[in-house]
Image: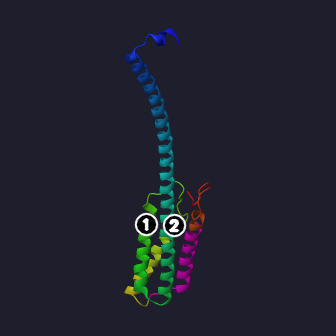
């Protein structure tokens, strides 16, 4: 044994052992902090991905219900139930306005023809109000159906662009 170790008493051995254990503990703590930092970053990324996926799914669900309402409006107009159709059109305009102002993730685009859909629905609302106040006014159901079908097609196209999971994302995560 080296001469240094031969002259050490028990207090010096305890001190040396404590120093060595402190050094090992510091290394373990640094490793754990680094590991925790990586896990925290992974959790943050997963949280962000979950948030954007939920926003996308909420937007798709909202737009799907708008398509259903459009079909209801078409049926109400064909059945000459103009007051009910007017209520549905007003509700639909409100839903679309809410969707337009809803905060969206960067992967959710606007519906390209949203402004045109608003214009068509506003015109329809005015015509329905006129029909209710002046029953002799004309309301061409085939033209209304065409306009509503075009709006539904634009929404369906938008849903088709957003309904699939992004690259690298699976339902298993």
Residue 11, horizontal then vertical, whole percent: 37, 17
Give SS at disc 2. Answer: helix
User: In the image, is residue 169 part of the stretch drawn in magenta?
Assistant: no
Give the residue drawn at x 39%, y 87%.
134
Residue 1, horizontal then vertical, whole percent: 53, 13
Earlier in the chain: of badge 2 and badge 1, it is: 2
Q: Quadrant of the C terminus?
A: bottom right
149 sits to left or right of 94 = right
- Main SS, magenta region, reads helix
Give the residue drawn at x 51%, y 61%.
56
Which label was assigned to residue 97?
1
Pair 2/1: label in front: 2
Q: Which residues are magenta?
A: 137-157
Mark 2, residue position: 60
Give the residue drawn at x 46%, y 90%.
80
Neighbour tally class for label 1: few under 14, some 14-19, many 20 plus, Cα within 10 Å: few
Residue 74, horizontal then vertical, whole percent: 51, 83
Give the residue drawn at x 56%, y 77%.
149
Query: Do labels 2 and 1 touch, CB within 8 Å?
Result: no
The answer to which of 63 and 138 lies nearer the viewer is: 63
- Marks 2 and 1, how far apart in space? 15 Å
Of all residues, the one furthest to the right in this rendering is 167
Give SS at disc 1. Answer: helix
Residue 112, horizontal then vertical, whole percent: 55, 63
Neighbour tally class for label 2: few under 14, some 14-19, many 20 plus, Cα within 10 Å: many
Q: Is residue 46 above or below residue 21?
A: below
């Amino acid at each position: 044994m080296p001469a240094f170790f031969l002259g050490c008493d028990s207090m010096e051995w305890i001190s040396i052992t404590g120093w060595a254990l402190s050094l090992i503990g510091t290394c373990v703590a640094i490793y754990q902090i680094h590991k925790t930092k990586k896990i925290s970053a992974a959790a943050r990324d997963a949280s962000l991905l979950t948030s954007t996926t939920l926003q996308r799914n909420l937007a798709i669900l909202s737009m799907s219900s708008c398509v259903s309402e459009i079909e209801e409006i078409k049926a109400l107009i064909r059945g000459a139930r103009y007051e009910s159709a007017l209520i549905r059109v007003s509700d639909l305009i409100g839903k679309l306005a809410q969707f337009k102002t809803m905060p969206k993730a960067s992967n959710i685009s606007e519906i390209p023809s949203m402004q045109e859909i608003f214009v068509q629905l506003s015109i329809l609302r005015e015509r329905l109000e006129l029909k209710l106040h002046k029953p002799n006014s004309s309301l061409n159901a085939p033209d209304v159906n065409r306009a509503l079908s075009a709006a539904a097609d634009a929404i369906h196209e938008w849903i088709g662009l957003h309904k699939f999971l992004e690259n690298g994302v699976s339902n298993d995560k």
